[in-house]
Image (tube, grey):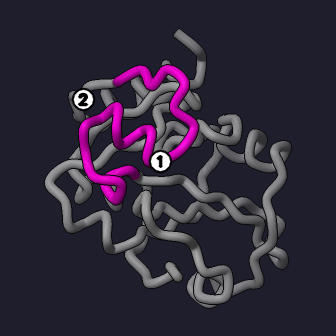
């Protein structure tokens, strides 16, 4: 088990959440992850990371699988212009590689925002610290676990 996967599992256990972690195999898209999980596309919580141009910090946007982040709306929500976060910033801030950024278990605190669409489901699935693993949880746990604020930032 990778260090990243162990960190996510521990963060969930420390929060009192018992969950199933599934291996995706070759799934590279949200739709492929949904197919493995046996759920709707929008039940996949994508972790989209942007760089705050003023703060220089990574900012996390948790969005439903079928939605796209509108950078103008997201910039307004974040209170600063957003740019592309490179792999080095993402790894330094979260400890995860691109494609496997989990909503929990980050190495450093991160500002986070939540797509309200995710709150419409009984269960959602999110990356578990690797591009090949996902875990399920009740979406109302996301704000508690991440400090994410629900906001309109999708196209």
Looking at the picture, does residue 119 appear above or below residue 2?
below
Q: Nearer the viewer, residue 32 or 153?
A: 32
Calculate the distance from the C-alpha at mark 1 to the C-alpha at mark 2. 19 Å
Q: Residue at x 49, y 20 (%)?
A: 25
Residue 123 coordinates in the image, percent (x, y): 20, 48
Q: Secondary structure at mark 2?
A: loop
Answer few, some or many: residues within 10 Å of disc 2's Cα (few below 14, many 20 plus, some between 14 and 19).
Answer: few
Q: Is residue 142 visible?
A: yes
Residue at the outermost top position: 1
Q: Secondary structure at mark 1?
A: helix
Which residue lies under the disc numbered 2? 19
Residue 152 coordinates in the image, percent (x, y): 44, 84
Which residue lies under the disc numbered 1? 30
Q: Is residue 66 left or right of residue 2?
A: left
Looking at the picture, does residue 6 appear above or below residue 60?
above
* Upstream in sequence: badge 1 or badge 2: 2
Q: Residue at x 14, y 54 (%)?
A: 122
Residue 33, quarter of the rendered image: top left
Looking at the picture, does residue 136 appear above or below residue 59?
above
Q: Residue at x 34, y 61 (%)?
A: 143
Q: Nearer the viewer, residue 35 or 129?
A: 35
Looking at the picture, does residue 92 appear above or below residue 57?
above
Looking at the rendering, the stretch of residues picked out in magenta corresponds to: 22-44
């Amino acid at each position: 088990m990778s260090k990243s996967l162990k960190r996510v599992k521990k963060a969930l256990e420390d929060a009192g959440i018992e969950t199933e972690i599934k291996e995706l195999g070759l799934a590279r898209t949200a739709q492929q992850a949904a197919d493995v999980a046996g759920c709707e596309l929008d039940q996949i919580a994508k972790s989209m990371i942007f760089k705050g141009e003023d703060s220089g910090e990574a900012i996390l946007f948790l969005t439903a699988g079928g939605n796209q982040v509108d950078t103008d709306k997201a910039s307004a929500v974040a209170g600063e212009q957003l740019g592309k976060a490179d792999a080095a910033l993402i790894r330094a801030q979260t400890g995860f590689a691109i494609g496997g950024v989990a909503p929990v278990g980050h190495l450093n605190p991160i500002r986070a925002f939540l797509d309200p669409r995710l709150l419409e489901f009984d269960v959602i699935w999110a990356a578990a610290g690797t591009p090949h693993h996902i875990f399920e949880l009740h979406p109302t746990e996301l704000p508690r676990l991440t400090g994410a604020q629900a906001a309109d930032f999708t196209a």
